Amino acid sequence: MTLIPCWGNTKTIDLYPGEGTVISDAIRQAAPYDTLLLKEGIYRENSIVVDKPLVLLGMEGAIVDGQMGDEIFVIVSDDVSLENLTLKNVGVSYLKDRAAIRLNRVSNVTIRNNQLLNTFFGIYLQKSNECLVDGNTIRGAAEEESRAGNAIHIWQGNRIRVTHNTLSHHRDGIYFEFVDESYIAFNQSRNNMRYGLHFMFSNDDTYENNVFQNNGSGVAVMFSNRISMENNEFLDNWGGASYGLLLKEISDGIIRGNRFQSNTVGIYAEGANRLIFSQNLLQNNGKAMDIKGNCMDNRIIENNFIGNTFEVLTNSKSNLNHFESNYWSQYSGYDLDRDGVGDLPHRPVNLFALIIDKVPAAHMLLHSFLVSSLEVAERMFPQFIPEQLIDSQPQISPYPYDFD
């Protein structure tokens, strides 16, 4: 997104660090579409209101220090660009969601290539449309969730692009609430306390080619529809209640080409309907997929399930979803006609997984003789596990998807 001046005779104004409200004073004196060029040094200032179209551009070493006070920049004008600045030290507040950069009821604003350090919230957009948040590094310093805001927080907006950002040590890396027709791509969201990405009541959005690693949980998509989730990595999200991807009350979406690796639960679905899960890799998770009985009309096709402790878990004896043509590393059947498809169907739910879901302490028996006996029993008496939850065309070899 490039800002194009609407008026002639725009000028560039050089700013140098000094006492008082250097940036605020320059904004008051500038004409619309001027450029404020912040030279190297520390500007000790906060509550800077940008109320006209401007470009605020930092030279290398330009730092704005909020001194643990209120928000640093509050943008209330369309057609603003804020780039190449280091912003730091926004104080924690239990009464106000203080942010280093707040956008309020604006459009066509670009926030690019900034570094935000030790801020409560990083970038906060409210009731704003058609904005770009690109190439920023946002690193929090809170050690407990109650004192942490979100790195990028968007509340009520349309057509927002969030791309190429690096986010860490916040509550959520990216938070969407009532945000539609927006795009999240090529972000790195790691070491956040709750979620790498969190959707609430948002529709018709796409997130792709992101990495969500070592967060409290990877991604939560809740009460949302028509979300496209492709080519992301959900890695190392471990903990007692951690998921790579949590789906709750979501419909008509696509989950394709993602890697779920080393999560407590790869995919957890509750009230998820008419989703397509295809061409994903679910590898070395505690539970690859936990899909509850209130999930209906989902298609789980052509995925690789490799090296998971448990492949599929459910809390219902019925199955209203379709599993077909997946590769299951725990499949013990054969392929006599050598067509690449197992001659026997695969049942990815096992009895011990159902027991662990009811009695978590039973994990200690995982490699015991008792569990081996249960595996024999479930082959003899398959009525103990969901009779209809089968893959009738299990693949003998994994699909050659490239996740490197």
Image (cartoon, rainbow, N blue to C red):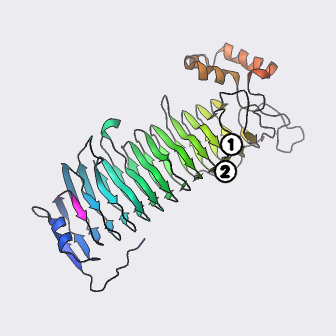
Q: Which residues are magenta?
A: 44-54
Task: Please identify the residue farthest to the bottom as the structure is shown.
Answer: 8
Residue at the extreme top of the image, as rendered: 370
The reply to whether callout 1 and callout 2 are in contact (CB within 8 Å) is yes
Residue 377 in view:
yes
Q: Is the residue 170 above or below the residue 64 in the image? A: above
| Neighbours of disc 1 within 10 Å: few (<14), some (14-19), many (20+) | many
x and y percent of residue 246 in the render? 54, 40
N-terminal label among 1 and 2: 1
The amino acid type, in three-letter code, at marker 1 is Asn
Residue 197 counted in the magenta span: no
Say which amino acid is labelled 2. Tyr
Residue 216: image location, x then y, percent: 44, 37
- Quadrant of the rendered structure where residue 361 is? top right
Asked if residue 331 is positioned above or below residue 359 in the image, the reply reads below
The answer to whether residue 62 is seen in the rendering is no
The quarter of the picture where residue 339 lies is: top right
Report the predominant secondary structure element of the magenta stretch: loop
The quarter in which the N terminus is drawn is bottom left
Q: Which residue is mark 2?
A: 401
Q: Is residue 177 above or below residue 238?
A: below
* 16 left or right, relative to 337: left
Left/right of residue 323 with respect to residue 157 in the rendered view: right
The residue that mark 1 highlights is 304
